[in-house]
Structure formats: structure tokens, C-alpha cells
Amino acid sequence: MNSTPTIEELAGAAPCLPTSGRLTGRVCWVNGGTSGIGRATALRMAAEGAAAVVVTGRREALGQALADEIHERGAEALFVAADATREDDVAAALQQALARFGRLDAVFNNAGCQERRRPLAEQGDEVYAQVFDTNVRALFHAMRHAIAAMLTSGGGTIVNNTSVSGIRNPNPGLSLYSASKAAANSLTRSAAMEYAPAGIRINAIAPGRVLTDMMLSSGIADMRSVAAGLPLRRMGHPEEVAAAVIWLMSDEASYVVGHVLAADGGFLAG
């Protein structure tokens, strides 16, 4: 079978996941949210009762369309065009959100990138800089500004999107990506220890094989075999990861701090 696989072949039917008002009344921010897991999480925030959802990203048309969908789901919505790797952009976007909504309760740091799949010795300094600027330095900047805002309002919760590649996954051809995600996991755990006493819970979600633009452009030749090799025999949907993110942000996870939660269909257990 050489045809391009369908979403249903790789991940099964789209899930119908119940909501229960887990984020009622909260002001949320998705940093890097115009597609994939970020988009799914922004919509899920609105469905879970968020008062407002702020989305930042570089693709303005997609961001404005997403803001309209968020509003249709009952939450106030604000899209701010921003490049996650530019600290001035991130700081200005957050200040705009604070000026409009007055506080910040929950943050999902979703911006990320990976290199073109090739051996380490063939990667250049420019690629290294791009991957680590996006996956580590930009995450540091976003966390720093979000934490400062939360300290003034008595606490909050942050979830960082990392990867199973940063936990236990030799990933030939993606050495820089894997190393950057391991750094992001470590940054998450360290910051969680520092700010838990101030009422700020920080955790990470580590997706496995999930049908996103990044996965589909990752250079994997046989997606069907990858899906069939997972314990669930399928890849994940962005909405399934979003549901786990919302749980980490919710009061149901009030005693979960510094944890990297794998949403991977059993990949790490295998």
C-alpha cells in the first residue's frame, strides 16, 4: 500500500471527549497556538469554561480565525501576532493580555520546532541555534514573563509542551531536537521546585506520535508502520493531548508539580 495514509488509518476516528468546566473563569494563554496541539488546547480551554483565551503565534490569519472559534465557544478571545523566539514580542503580547483581562491564570507553552532529519555531523550551527532558540531559550523567556505575572496575582499553572524524545527515545537524525526537549523537561522540573511555594504549579506534557504538522513533515517514510508499532496501534489526535494539558492545569491535578506527563499511546512503556 503506497498511497498517502488517511488520518483515520493513522489515528482512528476523531475522539469525542467530554468537558466538565475544569477551567471555569480562568484567563489562559497559549503561546504558539495557531495549529496542531496548540490550537486544540486553545479550543479546549474555551470548552472547559475559560473566561478568556489569549493566543500568540506568527500566522495571523490562522490566529484570527482561531480567536473567532474560541469566541463561538463562549470565551473572550485575543490573538496577538508574535514570534515566540523574540522576547520583546512575547513580553508585549503578555502585557496586552494583562491590560485587557487583568491577570493570568494558566499558560500552555507550545512553540517548538525540529531540524531536518539528518546525522548530527551534518547539522550546522544555524540549525542548532534555531532549534535551541525555539525549544529552550524562547521557553525560558515565556516562563519568566508568565511567572512574573502570576506572582503578582497569587499563583497559577504552567504546562510546557516537550516530547517523549526528551525522556527516553534515541531519535536518529533528530539529535538536536531530542537534546532541546530534554533541556525543556529539566527547565520545567527546576522551575516547578522554585515556584511551587508561591502557588505556581509547573508541569510538562510530552507527546509521542501525534498527528501534527511537525509529525507529518518529520521525514518518516512509513507512517502506517509507525502507527501500527505503538501499543494502541494508532497515533494520537491533538485533541487527546489537549485534554491531558487541561487536566494538568485543573484543580484535579492540584498536587501534581514538576511532572512530565507522557501522552504517547504507550510508547515509553514499550
Image (cartoon, rainbow, N blue to C red):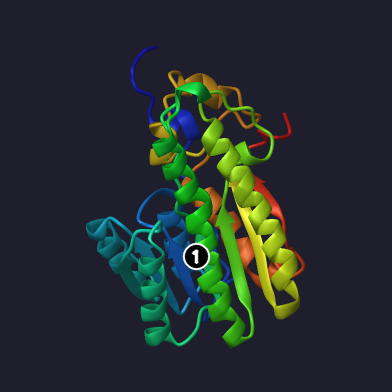
User: Looking at the rendering, which quadrant does residue 113 occupy?
Assistant: top left
- Position in image of residue 255 (x %, y %): 77, 68
Image point 47% across, 30% down: which residue?
10
Indicate the amino acid at tag 1: Ala
Query: Label 1: how many residues lie within 10 Å, few (<14), some (14-19) or many (20+)?
Result: many
Image point 65% across, 50% down: which residue?
185
- Position in image of residue 173 (x %, y %): 51, 24
Instruction: Answer above or below: position of 222 versus 231.
Output: above
Q: On the rendered structure, is 117 left or right of 270?
A: left
The residue lying toward the viewer, choosing from 244 and 34, is 34
Q: The N terminus lies in which quarter of the figure?
A: top left
Instruction: Answer above or below: position of 213 versus 56.
Output: above
Image point 60% across, 51% down: which residue?
184
Residue 230 visible in this rendered orientation of the protein: yes
Q: On the rendered structure, is 188 left or right of 235?
A: right
- Position in image of residue 137 (x %, y %): 51, 55
User: Looking at the rendering, which quadrant does residue 8 occupy?
Assistant: top left
The residue lying toward the viewer, choosing from 183 and 158, is 183
Residue behind mark 1: 142
The residue lying toward the viewer, choosing from 70 and 61, is 61
